[in-house]
Image (tube, helix red, strand yellow):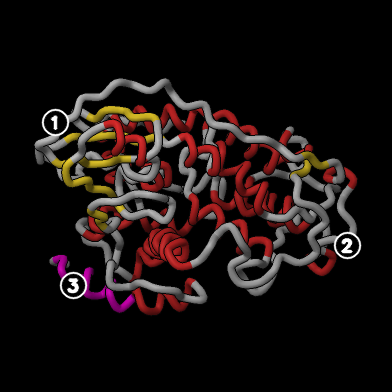
Amino acid sequence: MNFPTKYSEIIARIESIDPIKYGETRNYLEGAVTYLSPYISRGVISTKMVLDKILAKGYQLEEIESFVKELAWRDYFQRLAQVRNLEQDIKFPQVDVAHHEIPLAVINAQTGIQAVDDAIEQLYAHGYMHNHLRMYTAALVTNIAKSHWLLPSKWMYYYLLDADFASNRCSWQWVCGANSNKKYVANQENVNRFAGTQQHGTFLDKPYEYLPPTKIPQELLETVEIRLETQLPDAEKIQIDATLPTFLYNFYNVDPNWHFGEAGNRILLLDPAFFKEHPVHTTVIQFVLELAKNVSNIQLFVGSFQELKETYTLNSIYFKEHPLNIGYSGIEESRDWISPEITGYFPSFFAYWKSLKKELMKIYQTYDH
């Protein structure tokens, strides 16, 4: 598993995408997935940039619809985060909750479901988990082990290089029925099919009418309440030119093209209070620091936005919009959406997709096909 941090290598990864093969195989563990999510989540690239580069290759919109939908899901979740409190159940209360902890077997990657255990080990080792395996893991935790979704979602977010507040929270709630009309479950046959395993005799090896089970499997009974903490780098002394504007980068924006070529102070803000509320592993922080090296003359400030303002004389502070930018002030700029016109709350992805498709046709027609 390899996630390069040089911008040229990230762009090369976009160029290598086969969107048709992706649509045909993305649900399989060995499918033609893009491995772009860490770069989109960290704001190095955007869903719109990826879509533009794919459309420029001459594909018909209809033949790559599956690929485009996955980009659209990410934008949809970001829009939800703008208008809903994702600390709470979005649509419905999660039902059949036994506790607010997490199964110890999940933490130890010893659930007995080989594909899930291997995926958890990969998460710890590489900061990545295939999207289908994320669904299997969340279903096992919330719907089989009957954990409330919040703490387990924080556990997964903690290790992911693509730690994305909106996508992660919304996806866990979709699986457990708090953001969908029913709980998601997968039996062992389904897991074997898409993960390439050949297990039998597990607590998932049942017809769907017997899932989820009424009783928690013995393997998942023991639970723990975990503590997640972020180790930030030491603060650095920075140099500010008070005559220039300040461009503020953070955990969700290390875009090297943002205001490229303009003179200004470029500050990567890592706020301890932010990471206390939304902790991530040291490897995730190191990933951000490496990505930030693509931004010329960027300086690191460890502290709050208010501390930065009180310590230095800053002129015209620019930052990109994000729901977790608590306490920011200055000139807020929009993120790079596939369609900035599609805003507000949509009760389902399909309602959002219906509106977005009209805009996609306009975007598609700007290319010479």
Closer to us: 369 or 94: 94
Residue 117 location in percent, x, y? Answer: 70, 38
Closer to us: 91 or 162: 91
Q: Judge left or right: residue 166 versus residue 245.
A: right
Closer to us: 319 or 97: 319
Residue 17 location in percent, x, y? Answer: 34, 48
Q: Which residue is mark 2?
A: 214
Q: Is residue 288 magenta?
A: no
Q: Residues within 10 Å of mark 1 (few under 14, many from 20)?
A: few
Q: Judge left or right: residue 332 versus residue 132.
A: left
Q: Which residue is mark 3?
A: 365
Image disc number at residue 241: 1
Query: How far separated are the C-alphas under marks 3 and 1?
Result: 44 Å
Q: Judge left or right: residue 313 versus residue 184.
A: left
Mark 3: which secondary structure? Answer: helix
Image disc number at residue 108: none
Taking the spot 74% from the left edge, 33% from the top edge, the residue there is 108
Type of amino acid under label 1: Asp
Q: Is residue 365 magenta?
A: yes
Question: In the rendered view, would you say 87 is above or below 37?
Answer: below
Look at the numbered discs 3 and 1 and tell me whether their residues touch, using CB distance below 8 Å. no
Look at the numbered discs 1 and 2 and tell me whether their residues touch, using CB distance below 8 Å. no
* Tag in front: 3 or 1: 1
For marks 1 and 2 on the same chain, the one whose residue lies earlier in the sequence = 2
Per the rendered image, the range of residues in magenta is 357-367
Question: In the rendered view, would you say 64 is above or below 320?
Answer: below
Closer to us: 183 or 98: 98
Taking the spot 84% from the left edge, 51% from the top edge, the residue there is 203
Type of amino acid under label 3: Gln
Residue 118 location in percent, x, y? Answer: 66, 36
Question: Magenta-highlighted stretch: main secondary structure?
Answer: helix
For marks 2 and 3 on the same chain, the one whose residue lies earlier in the sequence = 2
